[in-house]
Amino acid sequence: MPAPQLILPPRGSTPPALDSQGRPRTLPPDLLREASQRLGILALLGAVLWFLGTVLGHVSLRAQSPPGDTRWQSFVFPIDAIAGVSIIASLAVYRYTRRHRESRISLDLGLAYMIASSFGIGLVFHIGMVYFGGRPPSERGMAPEISWVGVEILLFAALIPTHPRKTVVASLIAASMNPIGMLIARANGVWDFGSAWNVMLMHYPDFLIAGAAGVISHVVTQLGRQVTRAREMGSYRLGELLGRGGMGEVYKATHTMLARAAAIKLIRPEALGAANSDGAQLAVRRFTREAEAAANLRSPHTVEVYDFGVTEDQTLYFVMEMLEGMDLETLIRQSGPLPAARVIYLMRQVCESLGEAHAKGLVHRDIKPANINVGQVGLEYDFVKVLDFGLVKEVKRPSATDTRLTVEGMTVGTPTYMAPELALDEAFDGRADLYALGCVMYFLLTGQVVFESDNVMRLMVRHIEEKPVPPSRRTDRQIPPSLDDIVLACLAKDPAARPPSAAAVAHALAAAEADVEPWTQEQAAVWWTSRARSAPREPAVVA
């Protein structure tokens, strides 16, 4: 495999990122979701303000009415009608943004909503001024002013990133709603403001704001393009964020030439225990060495590593195949313990992956249900992929109640599935992975972990000293004695008492299959097909 290279944006001009339909995209999907969410918040705020404005208008009318006058309780047409329509429209926009979080239409809808809302403001402000006790321009002069329409234009330009040209055009139309409202007011005999130039004199600040909105929109959309370009890493273009964990983020990615889907895992140096620049350099060297070894694994049951490297800011990255399905921890949490035959079927595949890795001197050190993905590959169901070979796990001091962390100075791993020699920081080999595999089989068969404790140190002590209860005694499901024996053999405290290799475990599992009705592809297909009908198909997050 070629030496890892720094991920840098291509020199010279960079073509804009394209969406699925080949159109220039100003925002990545996750930022588009955030923009749509902001539009929903603005629309909801608009509904609240329209309601409060209407109520306070009637309160103001009451305060100015003579005693006994009940007109303030009456429906004021068209003011209240405009407010009611505006509230309904605002709530409709809010509902749309909740249901279509990644729709490009949301941005254009935001501009249309801004114009419609400005029209309502223009009508209510100028027609309602007299209804609610305000003074017309003939009495208070035609002094220039920034209206609520101007405020709305600025908010939308800053929070809803659209193309600057669209923003300017929409903002100019929105700014025109005040003059239009004045003209409609004069046509209805409400105001008499003389020359039409007085309209422009009063509201020209809103038009200046509309021009400024174009500049603001340009800055915001440029930031979005910079994010998109920054995510174009080497030959891969980053897409939506799939997951975020303690070590970094996982993004969906596409190869710019092959259009091949992939998952890119970004790992921060500090997540590897790098407290300073020297530590970061050491973490990078260790990461590179182990990633190179992991990339040379060829078992079909090991997640394929396409590429790896280091960015200029020392962020480490893995480019891996995109998986469908779910990890075994999620499967058990959602569906409960598995039949013994299915556990045998899955674990034999894990053994194949571990066998190759151990033969090449690579120990996983963190075998657990969350690091084993199962799904469909091609036409085969229940296909296993072992994740995270070669990744240096998070190293930090755990709290007494966290059983999923690692202890500073110890060989990495997850205490719930950690072999005694790892907990004691002693020499280890591939048999440490076999102990973890026994813990995984125990969890799949019973839905429970081998040992439980709220204290991470006490949990490790239990793994070091306590004899496990056979899985058949922790569940009502039928588990053959031969499978019980395999699990307990893997859970032996002394590595020498465990099976000598992953191949030996696989051989024992094949023999145990004679004691159960074998799990078939037909059964697996039925299981996954029934699940697909009840839940949308999603990529697995390699976190």
Image: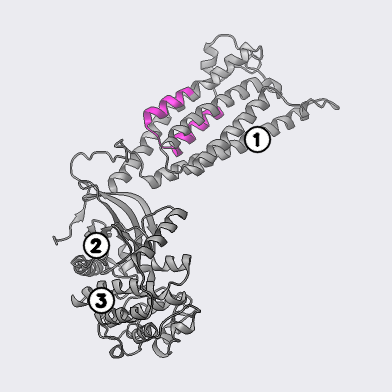
Where disc 2 sits, the SS reads loop
Q: Secondary structure at mark 3?
A: loop
Could you say which is closer to the camera, residue 463 or residue 392?
463
Identify the disc placed on residue 66.
none
Q: Which residues are magenta?
A: 146-173
Q: Earlier in the sequence, mark 3 or mark 1?
A: 1
Q: Nearer the viewer, mark 2 or mark 3?
A: 2
- Circle 3 residue: 363
Q: Main secondary structure of the magenta part?
A: helix
State the residue lying farthest toward the left.
2
Residue at which label 1 appears: 51
Amino acid at dot 2: Glu
In the rendered structure, are the residues bearing label 2 and label 3 in contact, judged by CB atoms less than 8 Å apart?
no
The image shows residue 322 at horizontal and vertical percentages of 30, 56
Quadrant where the N terminus sits is: bottom left
Tell me the tag on residue 304.
Answer: 2
